[in-house]
Image: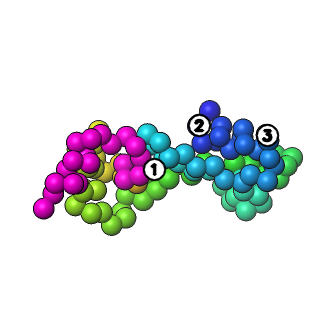
Amino acid sequence: VNDTVATLAEARYWDDDVMIAVILGTGTNACYIEHTDVIPKLQGPKPSSGRMIINIEWGAFSNSLPLTKFDRDMDSASINPGEQVVGEQVSSNADGDDLETHLVDD
């Protein structure tokens, strides 16, 4: 199970008013509860609740967002340059060398 979906499911076990879960850690993601009648791609039987969890996977949301010099440097040094740039920008997966680069750059 995806960690963000599991977080939302667990939170809703205790409080049915919880509608969103966000993970900010070594990666980042979000999910939310949506009414099935507004999901055009949904085929086949729908859940009896009329709602379902939508997993956004926003770490790869838009690789066309404006990037700073530091974002481009971090992306080019990543395992998958050009992919999941938003995840690279906000996750804690960066190491001390990344921070040092930001602090000492002219």
Q: Which mark is residue 2?
A: 2
Crowding at dot 3, Cα within 10 Å, few <14 / some 14-19 / many 20+, comes out as few
Q: Which mark is residue 75?
A: none
Under tag 1, what secondary structure? Answer: helix
The amino acid marked with disc number 2 is Asn
- Res 44 seen here: no
The residue carrying mark 1 is 59
**How far apart are labels 3 and 2 at the CA level?**
16 Å
Under tag 3, what secondary structure? Answer: helix
Crowding at dot 1, Cα within 10 Å, few <14 / some 14-19 / many 20+, comes out as many
Report the front residue among 69 and 62: 69
Give me the residue at 80% from left, 47% from top. Answer: 15
Give me the residue at 45% from left, 50% from top. Answer: 59
Q: Is residue 40 left or right of residue 73?
A: right
Q: Residue 14 placed where, x, y %? A: 79, 41
- Quarter of the picture holding the N terminus: top right
The residue carrying mark 3 is 13
Q: Which residues are magenta?
A: 88-106
Under tag 2, what secondary structure? Answer: loop
The amino acid marked with disc number 1 is Gly
| Tags 3 and 1 touching, CB below 8 Å | no
The amino acid marked with disc number 3 is Tyr
| Tags 3 and 2 touching, CB below 8 Å | no
**In terms of image quadrants, where is residue 34?**
bottom right
Looking at the picture, the colour scheme in use is: rainbow
Give me the residue at 79% from left, 40% from top. Answer: 13
**How far apart are labels 3 and 1 at the CA level?**
26 Å
